[in-house]
Each structure stands twice: as structure tokens, then as C-alpha cells.
Amino acid sequence: MAAPKDPRPCSIADALALVGEKYSLLVLREVCLGNGRFDQLVRNIGAPRDILATRLRRLVDARILTKRAYSERPQRFEYRPTEAGLELEPVLMTLMTWGDRHLRGDEDRPMVIEHSCGNELVPVVTCRACGDPVSHEDLTAHPQVPGWSVAGPTAA
């Protein structure tokens, strides 16, 4: 079978096209932590200024961040997450937990996030309908795009 000219339609791929660029999720991390000024972002992320400026423009254009002037002379801006940006925060928390567990070890964590209940946040994906934690074994994919199955493109 010949390779399809287009890859599988996928919301994960669409999201990664936007936030999967180097530094984009780190920008979102810092903005969610309240560090939305350009100099703070440069210092805390370590990205080159020109690349950081490009990422910020793209995230603002995609309505993940807002840009607001905090100084007129010289003109300076700060960035804040929009509702769409805040919806990515659980993704960041889950990714951080995965990194702590699989890349650093629980003893070498650079940051701990505390929930408003006073306990350390340990994110868990749950089913909205039944409330049960989700595991791989609980999932069944149902492709919604005509011409695609779980295994790939179907014959026309």
C-alpha cells in the first residue's frame, strides 16, 4: 500500500504544531507562574531573545497569551495566559510530573506545586462521566474522520 499523501488527522498534531515548538511550553510555564515580562522570560527560560519574541508573537496570535503594556517609556509588555492558555496548565502539570518520575527521580524535583487544599498536586486524568482514573487499558479509540481507522487509512 502506498503511503498516504496526508498523515492521520489529529488534534494532538494540531496542538503540537502550535505549542510544540522549542520554548513554547516553557513560555506558558513561566506566564502561568506569573513571570510574564520579557526579561523574566529570557532569564528563566534561557531562550535567545529573537526566538522568544517569535514564540510570544505566535502564542498571542493563537490567543493562548495576551500582551499588555506595563510601561509606556520605554514601551514594555507583559504576557498573561488567556482561558485557552490556562486550559493547557493541566498539560504542563502532567508533563512536569512525568518528567519528575521518569527523568529526574522524586528526590531531585526542581519544583513542587501545591493545590489550594494545601497538599502537593499530583495530577490524575479522570473520566468526566464516571470519575474513575484513566489507564491505557480503559481506552478505545473511535476515529471520526472518513477514510481512517485506528490502524491507518482505509481503502477507498
Image (tube, rainbow, N blue to C red):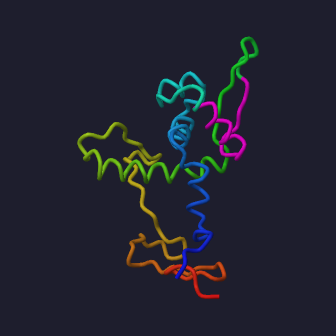
As drawn, is 66 to the left or to the right of 118?
A: right
Q: Is residue 117 left or right of residue 104?
A: right
Instruction: Look at the image and give the residue range highlighted in magenta.
Output: 52-69
Q: Which residue is nearer to you in this view: 60 or 121?
A: 60
Q: x%, y% of residue 109? A: 31, 40
Residue drawn at 60 percent across, 48 percent down: 86
Which residue, as the protein is rendered here, is positioned at the far bottom?
A: 156
Q: What residue do we see at 57% from left, 25% from top?
A: 49
What is the tally of numbered marks visible in this picture? 0
* Magenta run includes residue 37: no
Residue 128 location (% of width, % of height)? 54, 71
- Looking at this rendering, what residue extends furthest in the right direction? 72
Image: 30 above or below 102: above
Residue at image location 47% in from the left, 68% down from the top: 126
Q: Quadrant of the C terminus?
A: bottom right
Quadrant in the rendering for residue 148: bottom right
Above or below, 72 relative to 29 = above
Q: Residue at x 57, y 60 (%)?
A: 13
Q: Position of residue 125 (x, y in %)?
A: 45, 64
**Can you give x and y, in whole percent of width and height, for residue 6 in the image?**
62, 69
Front one among 2 and 153: 2
Q: Nearer the viewer, residue 132 or 86?
A: 86
Residue sitting farthest toward the top: 73
